[in-house]
Amino acid sequence: MMMIFGIPLQAFLGQLLIGLINGSFYALLSLGLAVIFGLLRVINFAHGAQYMLGAFVALLLLTKGGASYWVALVASPIIVGLVSAAIERTMLSRLYKLDHLYGLLFTFGLALTIEGTFRYFFGASGQPYPAPSQLQGAVNLGFMVLPIYRGWVVVLSMLACLATWLLIEKTKLGSYLRAATENPVLVQSFGINVPLLLTLTYALGAALAAFAGVLAAPIYQVSPLMGTNIIIVVFAVVVVGGMGSIMGAIVTGYMLGIAEGLTKVFYPEASNIVIFVIMAIVLILRPAGLFGKDV
């Protein structure tokens, strides 16, 4: 049996795959956080709740609405995005001119409210979410057996991250969004609806979180606590990548997910803290993050 650093090759590649899958969710969630903070300057603590909400909306569409996995995959992020847009327009937008702490406290309270509501109606235990029949089973690659659904998650998350980066960095709408955060008065003088742009930005970040929740549901089950369990790690990913950096969120998400997976092979006891250790080292050496810009 082939070995890598004294570890069987199959075990090594298996943990690498797990790290890549976790990195896919870290990348999607941290990307949504980076979009919201980079363009709205809001630290969205409700991001984990929106991730959970996406999974639950998909589960309800599947079990109560009779929708297929594919319909739920598209509809759930749209529904969560629309609900989040309404919250931003009616409540969060009133806090933009205040200290960032107010936005943080509001989104933290919103997260507790959403989580508490779902715990009341569904309990704290996880509920199964079946993968579609087309994505069940596994493929034998010779050196390892690859579950089809997990491969699908990695590919789809990469495509979603790339599409979001292109939207923000390479399109006219993205240029409007970036300009509106830098000088909203000037942008509005050109006839552009800045409040609508900000609402769309928050809805986009929330939809990315919900999309990650739908992808995660067949792997981790659907639970009111699933957002709480991941959001602290995602904040660490955003800090390492650089607050507000779109590319930093994507690259760092995958990188730290892989680092976490490989740590489980070589030093399992440290796998739960390795991301925070890396965050501490990065903050000491480069306080703005790997891709952040120094002020």
Image: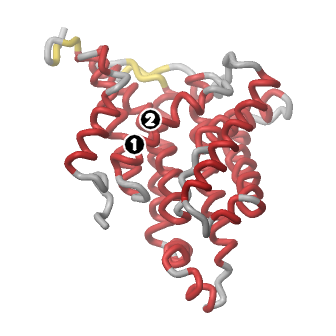
Which residue is found at the position 63% from the left and 43% from the top?
Answer: 108
Which residue is found at the position 27% from the left and 19% from the top?
Answer: 12
Q: Quadrant of residue 189?
A: bottom right
Amino acid type shown at disc 2: Val
Q: Residues within 10 Å of mark 1 (few under 14, many from 20)?
A: many
As drawn, the label of residue 133 is none
Assign the N terminus to one quadrant of the image.
top left
Q: Answer yes or no: is residue 134 visible.
A: no
- Given residues 194 and 128, the one toward you in this image is 194
Pointers 1 and 2 in contact (C-beta within 8 Å)? yes
Q: Answer yes or no: is residue 96 visible.
A: yes
**From mark 1 to mark 2, how far is it between C-alphas?**
6 Å
The image shows residue 295, relative to residue 158, as above or below, that is below
Assign the C terminus to one quadrant of the image.
bottom left
Q: Residues within 10 Å of mark 2 (few under 14, many from 20)?
A: some
Q: Which residue is mark 2?
A: 233
- SS at mark 2? helix
Q: Quadrant of residue 284?
A: top left
Which residue is found at the position 50% from the left and 45% from the top?
Answer: 28
The image shows residue 71, relative to residue 146, as above or below, that is below
Image position, residue 97 (x, y; %): 61, 69
Image position, residue 51 (x, y; %): 62, 39
- Given residues 15 and 87, the one toward you in this image is 87
Image position, residue 229 (x, y; %): 54, 28
Amino acid type shown at disc 1: Val
Q: Which residue is mark 1?
A: 237
Toward the left, the furthest residue is 5
- Given residues 283 and 131, the one toward you in this image is 283
Image position, residue 82 (x, y; %): 75, 55
